[in-house]
Amino acid sequence: MEYLEPFNSYIDMENWKLEPEGEGIIRKLSDMDDMYYDQEAAKESLEEDPIIYEFYTVKVPETASNLLHCISTINPGKIGDEYFMTKGHFHEVEDTAEIYLTLSGEGQMVMETPEGEASVIEMKKGSISYIPPYWAHRTVNTGDKPLVFFAVYRGDAGHDYGSIEEKSMAKIVVEEGGEVSIKDNPNY
């Protein structure tokens, strides 16, 4: 039998990078402009095409017996009154759970079941957010500095972004009167 060698990865706590960096994805507004409910504000912001978030995963075999882990950074900002967020996804292996450890910043995790039952929980430095199997999840930065978190999930989980792109999510996180507000998504 061929064994994967044990290894360490490190989090650069000053720059919020994973070392070794691993495979990365950078999402700009143009990669997800249709995810925001205020399409007029999204179109206006496309001229700048800001980086919304980025994440880097450790390279391990994508099998059920391995744990993928990554570090994600969501930049501060808003499209209209809706805060910067990740695309959100279900896992292709639907009964996959996931853990997020918030390292810096503040935000909200928006989750929902395939039937549309929604839950929103706070993320802040030191919080460990548990995402149960079958729940879609999206992370939202509600602060004025980057929201950084470390995530762990089974190696073969995969990501189903299409279901969220198709119908969005039931809840949105917006700024209303200078406060964070969780509202029903008018486009859901």
Image (cartoon, rainbow, N blue to C red):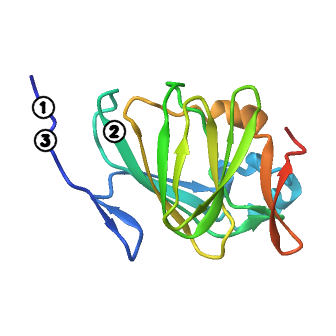
> Which of the 4 image quarters holds residue 11?
bottom left
**Is residue 24 found left or right of 48 in the rendered image?**
left
Q: Residue at x 47, y 46 (%)?
A: 99
Percent x, y of residue 70: 40, 51
Under mark 2, the amino acid is Leu
Count of numbered marks: 3
> Which of the 4 image quarters holds residue 38?
bottom right
**Is residue 61 found left or right of 96 in the rendered image?**
left
Percent x, y of residue 179: 82, 71
Q: Which mark is residue 5?
A: 3
Q: Residue at x 38, y 65 (%)?
A: 17
For label 2, the residue is 67
Q: Are marks 1 and 3 in contact (CB under 8 Å)?
A: yes
For label 1, the residue is 3
Under mark 1, the amino acid is Tyr
Q: Nearer the viewer, residue 15 or 6?
A: 6
Disc 1 versus disc 3: distance between alpha carbons? 6 Å
**Is residue 88 found left or right of 54 in the rendered image?**
right
Q: Residues within 10 Å of mark 2 (few under 14, many from 20)?
A: some
Q: Tag 3, which secondary structure? A: loop
Quadrant of the image containing the C terminus: top right
